[in-house]
Image (cartoon, coloured by chain):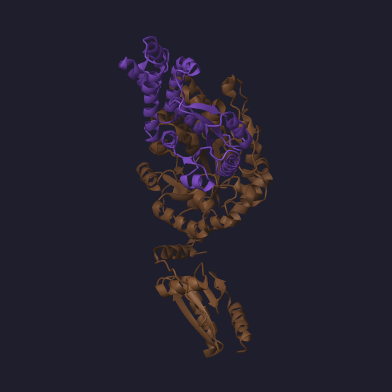
């Protein structure tokens, strides 16, 4: 961990980024939803109904991914279920709404009253309260179903035509959904959430005029309410919703978060214009879920470069795919939180492709042990410098029996050696071709032990 | 006569259903697709012409605007509703054989997936373009596609998925169809689906939007 990181908590980092204030680094918020179930080996349908499982899943995600902020529950069906929509549950996805009471002849007035005890709301709030106590330094996101998506759950696709044919009815429904959103937001804030994220993916399906007419009034009031309580707000939308991003920003949330369907640069400019924060847009499936760690690192770096350092929060485009490989999300963490690793990825990205693998068979000798330290560049990377110094110091007493070399990956020779030795991270220490110390500078005792072992193998002690 | 067909196309493009329909606001109180279609048929315009030079022209325009993000789902649904109203007048001619559909298209969202907005848009666009559409709904298993395919052996099959996790179910359905009816043309689509995925699972057609599918079908059939 670098010095900078210790000066700021994740929660502070999020709070400052959301207000477009300088932070020591870009904050990172993995949208862990059913992925939490994967982390605790539980199917989605059990996970999302059990507050203890959610607590364990989020705990594990915090431990593995060192996030600055994290959602407690990512399930856009909680309110709909409590209001009488039937759900179809799945093992590897959040549930899906399969009945729409307002389309089945039930009136708004006949819908069940929403209270803190309805449906799975107690599960969400209990998980929030406990996680709040366990992780005071992490920003907790309370995710609520956006009013338009909730309207669609309740009325089905009829809402689309209702907006055109009977706008008054559509307004009444949106007003009702706004009330539900306000209740959920209040309960999440009381339970300890720092950020209220309004997730309204279905708005990607409508035009800006409809958005301004039906969605904007409801969410603007909601964000005002959150602001009045000194909490922060975010407006998430998944899908191709570029047409509505300026209107979303005009609703005055603290942050707008989008997915890979929208260029981050467009959102950055819009956010700047409205002086709000913005987030996104790591590719959920093609990179985070299906890519290699190397692809994830490169993609994270590109996203960080596109997002810049003012008001940007790094996050996946939407709810993480349940079985997203843990090592891929840890790769994001590494790039966002370790400036040296970021520099390493950047160097590799710009480096020429080394096609041939150098034959090292002639390199190893019977009368000495060869120590190769692969670095970014010992002069500009402090951990690299310490590792080189530690190895040189430990080698000194053995004279000619040890040969210590540094290879910087900033030149071709270093890149060739990196490839030949199969090194994936820097700094790294390799003794006679065996990768021994990666990233961490080991205590002198351990270096000594490794050297002795290698020398003994060649009868050089 | 030409004017009536242009009115039909215009009403469908802008989602004007009938004289009572308040949408679009600037056409309030004016006749819609319903009235103009009836007038055209009463005036002796052939049903085939009403379909190809009226309905299809309107749907083609709205399909293109949807692809270019000039209109969105609500507007397309209004156009589809206008088209369905007009189509009611044409149904007897399909039954009598005066109009022959371009082909039969069996469509459904694959099992495990309960999202149907995209699938419905495709079904509407195809209907408006002269295809006979058999909509199997959502969460459709391979057996149901195959049973329907046995009843309509020359049909094209369209598989839709919104969730990344159900894309593998799409693959299973393609494999089953390939085993039992290898010559069937299969189209795939949905937000996470790509051309690369289509090729990988051995489907024949992929399009990112309904209009694209229509173009693919024109080439393939």
Left-right relation of A290 to A250: right
Chain assigned purple: B
- Location of the N terminus of chain B by quadrant is top left
Q: How far across and how far down the image is residue B107, in percent?
A: 54, 32
- For image coordinates 39% across by 44% down, the residue present is A267
Label total for image: 0
Q: Nearer the viewer, residue A19 or A401?
A: A401
Q: Position of residue B56 (x, y in %)?
A: 39, 25
Image location of residue A107, percent across then percent down: 58, 19
- Chain A's shade in the image? brown
Viewer-nearest residue: A24 or B140: B140
- Quadrant (top left, top right, bottom left, bottom right) of the C terminus of chain B: top left
Q: Is residue A200 visible?
A: no
Image location of residue A48, percent across then percent down: 64, 41
Classify A59 as above or below B33. below
Q: Residue at x 38, y 46 (%)?
A: A268
Q: Is residue A135 left or right of residue A415?
A: right
Q: Quadrant of residue B75?
A: top left
């Amino acid at each position: 961990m670098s010095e900078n990181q210790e000066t700021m908590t994740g929660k502070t980092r999020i709070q400052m980024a959301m207000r477009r204030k300088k932070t020591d680094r870009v904050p990172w918020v993995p949208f862990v939803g059913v992925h939490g179930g994967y982390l605790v080996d539980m199917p989605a349908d059990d996970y999302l109904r059990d507050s203890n499982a959610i607590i364990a899943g989020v705990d594990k995600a915090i431990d593995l991914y060192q996030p600055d902020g994290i959602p407690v529950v990512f399930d856009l069906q909680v309110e709909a279920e409590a209001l009488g929509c039937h759900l179809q549950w799945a093992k590897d996805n959040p549930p899906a709404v399969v009945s729409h009471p307002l389309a089945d002849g039930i009136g708004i007035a006949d819908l069940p009253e929403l209270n803190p005890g309805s449906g799975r709301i107690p599960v969400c709030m209990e998980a929030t309260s406990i996680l709040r106590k366990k992780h005071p330094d992490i920003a907790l996101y309370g995710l609520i179903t956006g009013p338009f998506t909730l309207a669609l759950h309740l009325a089905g696709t009829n809402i689309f035509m209702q907006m055109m044919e009977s706008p008054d009815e559509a307004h009444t429904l949106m007003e009702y959904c706004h009330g539900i959103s306000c209740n959920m937001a209040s309960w999440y804030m009381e339970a300890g959430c720092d950020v209220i994220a309004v997730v309204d993916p279905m708005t990607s399906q409508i035009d800006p005029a409809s958005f301004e007419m039906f969605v904007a009034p409801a969410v603007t009031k909601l964000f005002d309410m959150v602001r009045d309580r000194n909490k922060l707000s975010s407006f998430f939308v998944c899908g191709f919703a570029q047409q509505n991003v300026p209107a979303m920003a005009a609703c005055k949330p603290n942050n707008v978060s989008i997915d890979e369907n929208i260029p981050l640069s467009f959102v950055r400019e819009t956010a700047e214009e409205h002086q709000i924060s913005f987030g996104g847009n790591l590719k959920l499936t093609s990179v985070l879920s299906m890519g290699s760690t190397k692809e994830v690192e490169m993609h994270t770096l590109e996203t960080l470069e596109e997002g810049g350092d003012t008001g940007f929060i790094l996050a996946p485009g939407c709810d993480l795919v349940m079985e997203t490989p843990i090592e891929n999300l840890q790769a994001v963490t590494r790039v966002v939180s370790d400036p040296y690793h970021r520099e390493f990825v950047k160097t590799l990205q710009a480096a020429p492709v080394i096609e041939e693998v150098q034959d090292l068979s002639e390199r190893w000798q019977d009368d000495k042990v060869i120590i190769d330290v692969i670095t970014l560049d010992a002069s500009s990377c402090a951990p690299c410098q310490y590792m080189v110094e530690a190895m040189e110091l430990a080698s000194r007493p053995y004279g000619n029996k040890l040969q210590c070399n540094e290879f910087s990956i900033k030149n071709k020779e270093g890149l060739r050696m990196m490839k030949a030795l199969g090194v994936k991270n820097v700094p790294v220490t390799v003794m006679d071709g065996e990768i021994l110390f990666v990233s961490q500078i080991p205590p002198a005792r351990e270096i000594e032990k490794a050297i002795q072992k290698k020398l003994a193998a060649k009868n050089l002690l | 006569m030409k004017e009536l067909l242009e009115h039909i196309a215009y009403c469908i493009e802008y989602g004007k259903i009938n004289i009572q329909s308040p949408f679009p606001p600037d056409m309030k109180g004016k006749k819609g697709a319903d009235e103009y279609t009836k007038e055209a048929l009463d005036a002796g315009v052939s049903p085939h012409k009403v379909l190809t030079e009226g309905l299809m022209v309107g749907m083609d325009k709205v399909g293109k605007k949807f692809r270019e993000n000039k209109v969105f789902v609500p507007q397309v649904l209004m156009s589809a509703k206008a088209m369905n109203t007009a189509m009611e007048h044409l149904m007897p001619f399909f039954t009598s054989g005066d109009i022959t559909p371009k082909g039969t298209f069996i469509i459904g969202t694959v099992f495990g997936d309960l999202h149907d907005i995209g699938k419905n848009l495709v079904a509407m666009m195809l209907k408006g373009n002269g295809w006979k559409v058999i909509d199997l709904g959502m969460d459709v298993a391979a057996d149901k596609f195959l049973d329907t395919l046995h009843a309509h052996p020359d049909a094209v099959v369209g598989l839709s998925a919104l969730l990344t996790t159900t894309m593998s179910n799409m693959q299973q359905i393609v494999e089953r169809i390939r085993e039992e009816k290898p010559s069937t043309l299969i189209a795939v689509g949905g937000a996470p689906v790509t051309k690369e995925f289509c090729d990988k699972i051995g489907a024949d057609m992929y399009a990112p939007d309904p209009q694209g599918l229509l173009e693919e079908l024109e080439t393939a059939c």
